[in-house]
Image: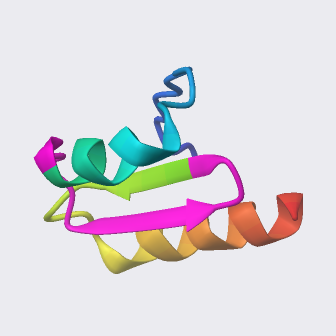
Amino acid sequence: MFVPAVIEAAEEPPARRRKIAAKTAAPRAAIELEIGEATIRIAAGTDAATIAAVIQALRAQA
C-alpha cells in the first residue's frame, strides 16, 4: 500500500514564539501526530485502513 507523504523541513522557531505559531497555523488535518521532531497530519475523510497503515509504518521506523 502506498501512502502519499509531504515532508516539510522548517527551522525551529524560538521557544517563546513556538506556542503562538502552533496556535495560528491552521492545518487542515483531522488527525495530527507528533513523534519526536516529526509532525504527521492526516486529512479529514481518510479511510481507517490508510490511517492504520500510516501508524504501523511509523511504529516500524521507531
Locate residue 36, reporting x and y percent: 71, 58
Asked where in the image residue 46 lies, by quadrant, the reply is bottom left
Is any part of residue 1 visible from this angle?
no
Residue plotted at (54% across, 63% down) = 34
Residue plotted at (85% across, 66% down) = 60
**Is 30 inside the magenta-drawn segment?**
yes
Q: Is residue 33 above or below residue 16?
A: below
Asked where in the image residue 11 lies, by quadrant, the reply is top right
Q: Nearer the viewer, residue 19 or 61?
A: 19
Residue range in magenta is 24-38
Q: Nearer the viewer, residue 53 or 1?
A: 53
Q: How is the image coloured?
A: rainbow
Which quadrant would the C terminus be assigned to in this image?
bottom right
Q: Is residue 6 above or below residue 59?
A: above
Locate residue 48, reporting x and y percent: 36, 79
Q: Is residue 23 left or right of residue 21?
A: left
Is any part of residue 19 visible from this angle?
yes
Residue plotted at (69% across, 72% down) = 56
Locate residue 61, reporting x and y percent: 86, 58
**Is 21 inside the magenta-drawn segment?**
no
> Which residue is outermost to the front?
16
Q: Is residue 26 left or right of residue 38?
A: left
Q: How many marks?
A: 0
Locate residue 17, reporting x and y percent: 35, 40
Residue plotted at (61% across, 48% down) = 38
